[in-house]
Amino acid sequence: MTAKFGVMATLVLAMAAADASANEEAGGDARWMTSWYAAAQPAWDNGFILPMNLPRLLNDQSLRETVRLSAGGQRMRLVFSNRYGRQPVRIGAVRAGPADGSVPALALTFSGAGEATIAPGAVITSDPVALAMPPLSRLTVSSYLPSPTPVASFHWGAQQTARLAAGNVVAAARFPGDTRVEGRLFFQAVLVEAPREAHTVVVLGDSITDGNGSTQDADRRWPDMLAQRLAPDGIAVANAGISGGRLLRDGMGQSALARFEQDVLAQPGVAEVIVLLGTNDIGWPGGPFAPAERAVTVDELANGYRQLLAAAHARGVRVTAGTLPPFEGALEGTPFAGHYSPEKERLRQQLNRWIRGCGLFDAVVDFDAVLRDPDRPQRLRQAFDSGDHLHPGDAGYRAMAAAVDVAAIRERLR
């Protein structure tokens, strides 16, 4: 579905330069690391089965978003992305502050200026701002887009609501806009200044990692709950999941193989990645999302995982693989029925056996064993099912986070 964009080298160099510049400006015993993240996706046309549910164009409008940090810090920097844009994006003003309003929102600058322009395919990183935020606290970010701005890069869904208002109202304590938007627009990451020994765990996945099926605006995705478990150790968790994400092929965004460099390896402070991918590689072909696509093979999926492993290990990043949860009856009774079949279930089980037994990963977390119904193992346990038989609900996501061996992560990151 997505086009191949000739901006990969520009983006990687921009992110690497931002990372290097950021760490040069941190103190001698400190470093910058990613505390919150939303992976960019390219906009799609009306021919795709799912709507974007976002405006196609912004002009003279302010956007207010709320995010929950994982690790805290005394200073922070914000990152904005135009990864898939074909024209520059002008950011007229940005303010950030605690969501509870305990401290007035502070104006951010970019290379000393109050506004900035993001080149096509690039990102921009703000100057450091002295804004102390504790772990797991919520941050409100308001940005102003003064010029006609097509939405080419965005993040779909994410179980989070933003609001739009006319004009430049980023400084308003009470945001006047009542237009609600589900998803992220241009805002990509929060970096916090942390001790040099601090690290980030990146979670790479699909809509299950992005939190579909969890309570809206409640931060109950499984990476959020993992962040709660790791927060006492100062370990951050960055969620690089995208709905419709696939390992081998583009879906509602680039494949994991294509985006692994930007969304995982380029993250400041990354030391570990947890990968949960393959459900859409198996479920999409022959179903409503990719009716003409041939079925994937387990060998192809295994080779894709090997490529991620090689890239991560070459950079000193450890890899934990998650087994695929069951999805019998996924999306039945909806226009998206056909995501599941007995043959797809056989592929899922074969892939899970390979993940458990290949011996290549630094660790394995058996989400399948945690979430499956013991009496019908091809289906989600009812107490963990959000209702669509594909995505867990809050209880299921809590069980997933509890299954991760955080003691082992702590030990590895000492």
Image: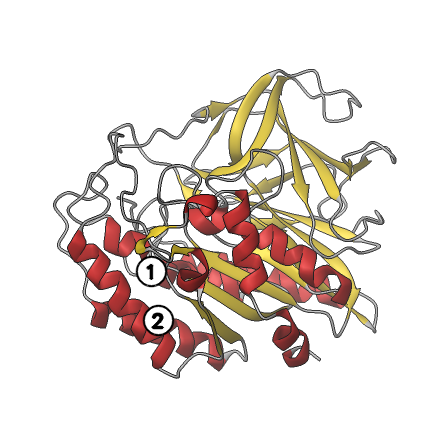
Q: Position of residue 391 (x, y in %)?
A: 41, 45
Q: Which residue is mark 1?
A: 247
Residue 76: give its label: none
On screen, residue 140 above or below 405: above
On screen, residue 136 above or below 34: above
Q: Amino acid at mark 2?
A: Tyr
Residue 305: give its label: 2
Q: Nearer the viewer, residue 17 or 399?
A: 399
- For the residues bearing labels 1 and 2, Cβ distance under 8 angstroms: yes
1 or 2: tag closer to the N-terminus = 1
Q: Position of residue 122 (x, y in %)?
A: 51, 50
Tell me what residue is drawn at x 30 percent, y 37 percent.
331
Asked whether, in this view, residue 290 is left or right of residue 308, the answer is left
Q: Amino acid at mark 1?
A: Leu
Q: Residue furthest front?
A: 375
Q: Position of residue 236 (x, y in %)?
A: 67, 61
Q: Position of residue 371 (x, y in %)?
A: 43, 56
Instruction: Indicate the quadrant containing the N terminus: top left, top right, bottom left or bottom right.
Output: top left
